[in-house]
Image (cartoon, helix red, strand yellow):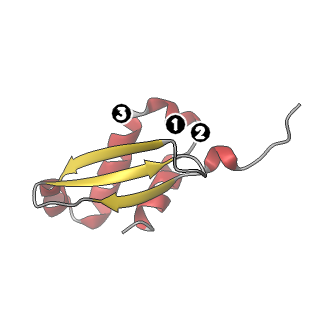
Amino acid sequence: MQPETNVRFLLAVKLTAPTPDAITFTFQRDFHGRDLYPLTVPSQQLHLLGMDDFLEYVADTYLAQQPAEALRVTRSTILFALVHST
């Protein structure tokens, strides 16, 4: 039996390549930066929702596009990573 580790909970988010039309968040799901998932959302959503609701929108979009992540990390973990990426 393998010992329990916190590796399964690793999630980092980096804001990359924001443009007037879109904002891309790159989710890093491993220590070595090999398991990356870019998520691009319309910049207009930030202006419509405000920062807090926008980050919730990004978290929900990430989970909708990557449903297996819900088995690995919680929505709160995703929001924490997003808040600390901005």
| Closest to the observer, 47 or 41 | 41
At which x and y percent is residue 13? Answer: 44, 57
Amino acid bearing label 3:
Gln
Q: Secondary structure at mark 3?
A: helix
Q: Secondary structure at mark 2?
A: loop
The quarter in which the N terminus is drawn is: top right
| Mark 3 or 1, nearer chain start | 3
The single residue placed furthest to the right in the displayed view is 1
Q: What separation in Å lies between label 3 and label 1 (alpha carbons)?
A: 11 Å
Q: Which residue is mark 3?
A: 65
> Which numbered dot is residue 72?
2
Mark 2 neighbour class, 10 Å CA radius: few under 14, some 14 to 19, many 20 or more: some
Amino acid bearing label 2:
Arg
Q: What separation in Å lies between label 2 and label 3 (alpha carbons)?
A: 14 Å
Apparent side of residue 26 relative to residue 50 in the rendered image (left or right) = right
| Mark 2 or 3, nearer chain start | 3
At which x and y percent is residue 5? Answer: 77, 47
Apparent side of residue 45 relative to residue 38 in the rendered image (left or right) = left
The quarter in which the C terminus is drawn is: bottom left
Do the numbered discs 2 and 1 sit on residues whose CB atoms are within 8 Å? yes
Q: What separation in Å lies between label 2 and label 1 (alpha carbons)?
A: 5 Å
Do the numbered discs 2 and 3 sit on residues whose CB atoms are within 8 Å? no
Mark 1 neighbour class, 10 Å CA radius: few under 14, some 14 to 19, many 20 or more: few
In the image, residue 65 above or below residue 74: above
Mark 3 neighbour class, 10 Å CA radius: few under 14, some 14 to 19, many 20 or more: few
Amino acid bearing label 1:
Ala
Rendered residue at 49%/61% (across/down): 80
Rendered residue at 41%/66% (across/down): 85
The image quadrant of residue 14 is: bottom left
In the image, residue 86 above or below residue 1: below
Q: Which residue is mark 1?
A: 70
